[in-house]
């Protein structure tokens, strides 16, 4: 007894937690308008099915010649059908059989689908491949045709038909459970449970079943709806059991008498449609509530970040040194007090960039440096006005060639992009459309922006590919993105960026995702192209080596603000802001300032590893 | 590419073989005393035995199946027990009618779902909400109820379309359109709901991809990027759903044909089912399996066209 006590303790708490999770989903559903309406309606249907004998005293199968097609009266509140049977009674008793039939389908489908899904997903091996194959086979068959074939052999039994339909639809459960379980199977906490000596049955019951429970409930609501519709369909075709009053057979009778009494059609149709809609709404409401509970955590995190941003920070601004003064060119871009924010679901705006001001002149490379999440990429994207969903410029101005881009229309921006302002992304592979050849992705923008013919654009694309150092331009031109290496893809993206002779280039960590040896080559290429085309460049990076290599000026960003800005040499020689100093210290401790791997080892290593894996495939 | 097609065809043939074998065993084992069922209760034991012998039912099951299979590969699926019409003829004469309904509904649902799905994904806001409500209703309400509502309103009350019947396209294209419009709408609605959801979801996913930003940074308009690049990338999953819908429509067509009195495969299926006409039911199962295999092959080829990675593997 004493030994059992500690084991019982945790089991109880887990059960309690589960119960409270279930209760909270139920409570949340009560607050969800469509979920509440659906649940009330379904509860009424179930109640009326149970209390059919109490609500009406009429026999659903009692035919009466005097009452054939009778209209509504005290004896028959909803009238009578073509055999003189009471419509209300048939409707109420019909809901019994419709619900019970759907329940048969649901139980059969759940038992087969969930158990096979759990076994295949958890234990894998031969059962995995066999059951997946069978599931695919069953899914490929049109269920209704199989039901008809079964009816031809087995005769008109509603229970059998609904059971067979349960088998046919069980892959819906199987796939759901299989996908969730095989995703969880190798999680560390499942390993930990196995190591600590829990039996497989216990692990499945406690750790795995909790993961798939909610999706199973949602799927069950959907399948019940489908089962009710299928059953009604069979009965409507007259293939059901004629002794059983059902919504489908009422439809059949109503349709046969549609010219004489259309309301006979109306009641069963309403019952079927409303029940199906209620079940679908309930499933949707459950999904919404489950998704919302995971989304609310994110929102809480974001507000915390917004609070951090309220702190004001000093901007250390260094004057031009002799080198930058000598190179003063025409002013291309002037950003003043830029603020970028994201709309939140609760109507508030979370700002990720605050009070950012910077100037970029023709022929000048301006570096934006800072750790991840410092707002440098957001600043870069806002210049192109290509912020992700929900993001927008919420304050300040971005003047380019005398026009405020913060207020420009989408059409004006489309005209500027590519032709005047170009963009080189960070991750080469994900920035090429895998469905189109590299050539077509270069040719299309040139035809749109420069108005070139297909032939001219192709010739120019081949020239550009050769210019960016691609050994066999013709072959790369016809290749798909997955057929070239990451370094090659980045060269292609650079070629694409400069293809329409832009004045301003936004480069977002153009070398971060590349191999160290390739990085140097790509930096050289960027420097050459920049001086060849005398472009102004905004270079986003987290690497001081890259800054020292390419930039004339640099702005150090932290928490969405610029904390220090000035000529590169001044910042390297006399960093004044404590944050800049701490950045330099972090590098100097490890010695070599140009070694990108030591800058932020975790991210870099992961990226390089993924590239390595991709290349070895 | 040819190897890809050949491999797919081979697996298709295996699938048809497995389905027809299982179906044959189930239908003939579960059918009970078939000769008695054909002749009725009043027939004498001698005539029943004679009938069983004539149908080859007195032979062992695997012999029967072997005979059926050897005929089936030459395209002969036996004759109906009740009308003596060859099964192949009974099916092919009705197939074009059902196919015209199913293909029509598939084309309509593809077009409408692309428009609705892209609108919902790119506009969001109230457009998205309206489309979402429509897809929930379209998914939840069974197609044959929609068909009944359409018949009641447009054919019986408003008399815009004919409630029943079918005119061959070759006889009169106008008459064909007048008879198939309502059935096709009823069939298409459920498909539209499912495919729209899929397209909406995959377009939203595709819009978040990095290459969309890069393409737009090159000066391509949002519309161009969505309809050329995003849609092509979102097309794969949508096609897969469309294929499932297409197969499912053959089931839906059975009821729809009954409602509109259209002489298609559905009518054959219902008659064969109620009579227990096993050769005809068997023929329908084989025909459906062939259609499933062909549709999946076409979808696989289209997937290869959409996604170059599929083509190579």
Image (tube, helix red, strand yellow):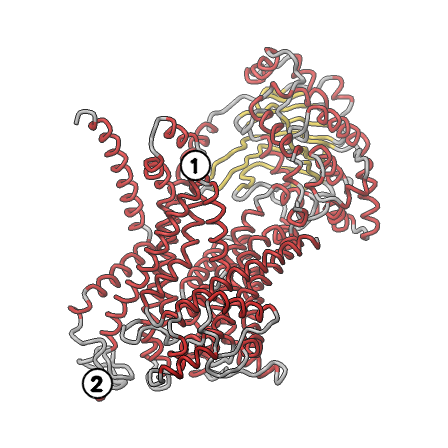
Residue A64, label in figure = 2
Residue A251, label in figure = none
Q: Which residue is painted at 58% across and 59% down in the image?
A: B12
Q: Is residue A336 above or below residue A75?
A: above
Determine which residue is flagged by label 1. A185
Q: Is residue A565 visible?
A: yes
Q: Secondary structure at mark 2?
A: loop
Where is residue A388, by image quadrant?
Answer: top right
Q: Which residue is painted at 35% across and 38% down in the image?
A: A204
Q: Residue A425: x percent and y percent?
A: 66, 36
Comparing A18 with A32, the one in front is A18
Comparing A575 with A514, the one in front is A514
Comparing A128 with B60, the one in front is B60
Q: Quadrant of the C terminus of chain A?
A: top right
Comparing A200 with B24, the one in front is B24
Q: Residue A268: x percent and y percent?
A: 32, 72
Q: Residue A183: x percent and y percent?
A: 46, 39
The chain under label 1 reads A
Q: Residue A466: x percent and y percent?
A: 82, 37
Measured in 3D between alpha carbons, the distance from the residue under mark 2 to the one under mark 1, in whole angstroms, is: 62 Å
The chain under label 2 reads A
Q: Secondary structure at mark 1?
A: helix
């Amino acid at each position: 007894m004493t030994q059992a006590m500690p084991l019982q303790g945790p089991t109880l708490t887990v059960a309690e937690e589960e119960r409270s999770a279930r209760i909270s989903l139920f409570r949340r559903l009560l607050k969800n308008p469509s979920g509440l309406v659906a649940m009330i309606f379904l509860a009424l249907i179930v109640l009326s099915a149970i209390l059919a004998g109490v609500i009406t005293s009429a026999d659903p199968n009692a035919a009466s010649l005097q009452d054939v097609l009778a209209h509504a009266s005290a004896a028959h509140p909803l009238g009578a059908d073509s055999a003189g049977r009471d419509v209300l009674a048939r409707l109420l008793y019909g809901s019994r059989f419709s619900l019970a039939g759907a329940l048969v389908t649901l139980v059969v489908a759940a038992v087969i689908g969930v158990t096979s899904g759990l076994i295949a997903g958890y234990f894998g091996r031969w059962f995995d491949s066999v059951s997946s194959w069978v599931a695919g086979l069953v899914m490929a068959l049109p269920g209704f045709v199989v039901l008809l074939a079964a009816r031809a052999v087995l005769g008109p039994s509603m229970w059998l038909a609904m059971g067979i339909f349960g088998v046919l639809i069980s892959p819906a459960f199987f796939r759901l459970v299989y996908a969730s379980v095989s995703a969880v199977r190798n999680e560390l906490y499942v390993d930990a449970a196995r190591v600590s000596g829990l039996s497989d049955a216990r692990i499945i019951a406690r750790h795995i079943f909790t993961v798939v429970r909610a999706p199973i409930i949602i799927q069950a609501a959907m399948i019940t709806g489908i089962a009710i519709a299928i059953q009604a369909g069979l009965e409507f075709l007259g293939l059901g059991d004629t002794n059983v009053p059902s919504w489908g057979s009422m439809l059949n009778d109503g349709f046969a008498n549609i010219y004489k009494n259309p309301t006979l059609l109306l009641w069963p149709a309403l019952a079927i449609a409303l029940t199906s809609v209620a079940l679908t709404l309930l499933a949707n409401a459950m999904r919404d509530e489950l998704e919302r509970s995971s989304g609310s955590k994110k929102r809480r995190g974001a507000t915390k970040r917004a609070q951090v941003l309220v702190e004001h920070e000093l901007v250390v601004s260094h004057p031009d040194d002799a080198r930058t003064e000598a190179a003063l060119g025409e002013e291309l871009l002037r950003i003043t007090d830029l603020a970028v924010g994201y709309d939140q679901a609760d109507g508030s705006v979370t700002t990720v960039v605050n009070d950012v001001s910077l100037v970029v002149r023709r022929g000048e490379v301006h570096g934006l440096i800072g750790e991840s999440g410092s707002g440098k990429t957001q600043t870069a994207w806002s210049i192109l006005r290509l912020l992700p969903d929900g993001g927008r410029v919420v304050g300040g101005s971005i003047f380019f060639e005398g026009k405020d881009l913060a207020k420009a229309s989408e059409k004006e921006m489309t005209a500027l992009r590519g032709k005047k302002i170009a963009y080189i992304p960070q991750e080469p592979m994900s920035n090429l459309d895998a469905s189109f050849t590299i050539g077509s992705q270069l040719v299309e923008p040139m035809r749109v922006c420069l108005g070139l013919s297909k032939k001219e654009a192709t010739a120019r694309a081949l020239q550009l590919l050769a210019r960016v150092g691609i050994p066999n331009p013709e072959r790369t031109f016809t290749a798909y993105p997955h057929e070239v290496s990451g370094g090659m893809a980045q060269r292609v993206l650079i070629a694409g960026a400069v293809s329409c002779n832009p004045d301003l280039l936004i480069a977002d960590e153009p070398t971060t995702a590349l191999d160290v040896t390739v990085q140097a080559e790509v930096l050289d290429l960027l420097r050459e192209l920049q001086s060849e085309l005398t472009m102004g460049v905004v270079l986003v990076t987290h690497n001081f080596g890259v800054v020292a290599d390419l930039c004339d000026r640099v702005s150090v960003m932290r928490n969405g603000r610029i904390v220090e800005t000035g000529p590169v040499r001044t910042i390297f020689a006399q960093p004044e802001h404590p944050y800049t100093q701490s950045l330099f210290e972090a590098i100097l401790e490890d010695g070599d300032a140009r070694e990108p791997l030591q800058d932020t080892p975790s991210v870099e290593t992961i990226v390089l590893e993924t590239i390595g894996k991709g290349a070895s495939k | 590419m040819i190897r890809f097609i050949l491999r797919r065809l081979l697996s298709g043939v295996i699938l048809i073989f497995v389905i027809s074998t299982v179906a044959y065993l189930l239908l003939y084992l579960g059918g009970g005393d078939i000769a008695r069922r054909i002749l009725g209760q009043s027939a004498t034991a001698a005539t029943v035995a004679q009938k069983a012998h004539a149908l080859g039912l007195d032979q062992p099951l695997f012999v029967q199946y072997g005979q059926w299979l050897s005929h089936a590969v030459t395209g002969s699926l036996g004759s109906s027990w009740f009308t003596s019409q060859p099964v192949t003829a009974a099916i092919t004469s009705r197939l074009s009618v059902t196919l015209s309904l199913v293909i029509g509904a598939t084309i309509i649902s593809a077009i409408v779902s692309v428009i609705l799905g892209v609108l919902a994904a790119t506009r969001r806001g109230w457009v998205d909400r309206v489309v979402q409500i429509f897809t929930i209703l379209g998914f939840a309400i069974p197609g044959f109820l929609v068909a009944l509502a359409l018949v009641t309103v447009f054919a019986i009350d408003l008399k815009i379309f004919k409630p029943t019947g079918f005119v061959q396209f070759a006889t009169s294209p106008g008459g064909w359109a007048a008879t198939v419009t309502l059935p096709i709408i009823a069939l298409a609605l459920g498909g539209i709901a499912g495919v729209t959801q899929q397209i909406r979801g995959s377009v939203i996913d595709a819009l978040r991809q990095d290459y969309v930003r890069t393409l737009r940074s090159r000066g391509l308009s949002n519309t161009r990027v969505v309809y050329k690049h995003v849609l092509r990338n979102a097309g794969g999953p949508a096609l897969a759903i469309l294929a499932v819908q297409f197969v499912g429509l053959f089931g839906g067509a059975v009821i729809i044909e009954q409602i509109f009195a259209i002489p298609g495969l559905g009518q054959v299926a219902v008659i064969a089912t109620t009579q227990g006409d096993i050769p005809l039911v068997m023929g329908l199962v084989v025909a459906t399996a062939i259609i499933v295999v062909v549709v999946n092959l076409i979808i696989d080829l289209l997937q290869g066209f959409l996604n170059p990675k599929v083509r190579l593997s």
